[in-house]
Image: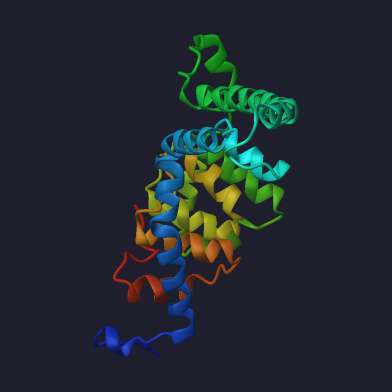
């Protein structure tokens, strides 16, 4: 028996409105916010420091008259009484401001400082698993069968065998993401796994945001994920090198 499913157009392929609304909200919330967080962190640190310093300005002496029940036009005796009470307060504010400024300066300096140069020996000692080695290790650690992983990511068995026998195999990004789904990785594991192949989930890519949405929700239903990707006009997971 030969069964074929024919989809005539995108309107014939409709998802639950609740799923799409959740994805829409996630994209709207993260599309710009993460770009600002990741690309403008230093600028924000500068702005925060400037704002903090502005809030630590020396209090004006007239503001203390009200606290003491004195009027602006006071006698010399009143002024002397004011200074006796106010000066310790002013000094305390100055000391606090100076201390906070030092802390803020250190934070911004560390953010702006150039990384220290490392020797080749240092770099060599920090080399860890390749992408292929991490893939095979995760399969063992999670107690999964290889077939569960490549089927869960809609990956061809021949491709998995090719990857298994080539330690230096360089996957396409969509292949690496498919294995994230098949391995049922959480978001931190996904970031680490993709980085071994030189990739990352970009906040400026709808494809990446949709994939991240499903991974963060712990939903590894690839068929549903592909339905959402299709609805947004994105590439489907399942076409590999």
Q: State whether residue 168 is above or below residue 141.
A: above
Which x, y percent locates residue 116? Answer: 50, 14
Q: Is residue 237 above or below residue 1?
A: above
The quarter of the displayed image where residue 7 is located: bottom left
Q: Quadrant of the N terminus?
A: bottom left
Residue 131 is situated, as x and y percent measured from the top left of the image, at 51, 39
Residue 226, quarter of the rendered image: bottom left
Q: Nearer the viewer, residue 78 or 132?
A: 78
Say above or below: 107 vs 210.
above
Residue 133 vertical placement versus 224 (above, below): above
Please give the name of the residue rendered at 43% of the width and 54% of the height, measured from the top-left corner.
Answer: 33
Q: How many marks?
A: 0
Left/right of residue 238 with respect to residue 71 in the rendered view: left
Q: Residue at x 66, y 45 (%)?
A: 66
In this orientation, which residue lies closer to the viewer: 201 or 178? 201
Give the x, y percent position of residue 233: 29, 70
Asked whether, in this view, residue 32 is left or right of residue 72, the answer is left
Q: 18 and 126: which one is in front?
A: 18
Look at 59% across and 67% down and name the residue there: 217
Q: Nearer the viewer, residue 217 or 82?
A: 82
């Amino acid at each position: 028996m030969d069964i074929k499913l024919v989809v005539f157009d995108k309107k014939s392929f409709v998802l639950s409105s609740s799923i799409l609304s959740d994805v829409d909200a996630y994209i709207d919330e993260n599309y710009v916010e993460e770009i600002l967080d990741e690309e403008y962190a230093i600028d924000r640190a500068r702005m925060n420091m400037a704002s903090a310093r502005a809030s630590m300005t020396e209090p004006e002496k007239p503001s203390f008259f009200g606290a003491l029940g004195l009027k602006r036009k006071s006698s010399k005796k009143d002024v002397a009484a004011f200074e006796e009470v106010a000066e310790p307060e002013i000094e305390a504010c100055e000391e606090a401001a100076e201390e906070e400024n030092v802390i803020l300066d250190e934070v911004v300096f560390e953010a702006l400082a150039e990384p220290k140069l490392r020797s080749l020996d240092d770099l060599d000692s920090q080399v860890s698993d390749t992408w292929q080695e991490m893939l095979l290790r995760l399969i063992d650690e999670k107690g999964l069968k290889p077939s569960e992983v490549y089927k869960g990511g809609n990956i061809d068995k021949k491709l998995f065998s090719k990857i298994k026998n080539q330690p230096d195999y360089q996957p396409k990004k969509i292949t690496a993401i498919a294995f994230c789904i098949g391995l049922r990785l959480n978001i931190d594991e996904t970031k680490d796994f993709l980085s071994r192949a030189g990739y990352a989930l970009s906040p400026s890519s709808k494809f990446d945001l949709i994939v991240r949405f499903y991974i963060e929700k712990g939903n590894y239903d690839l068929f549903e994920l592909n339905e959402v990707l299709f609805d947004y006009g994105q590439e489907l997971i399942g076409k590999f090198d």
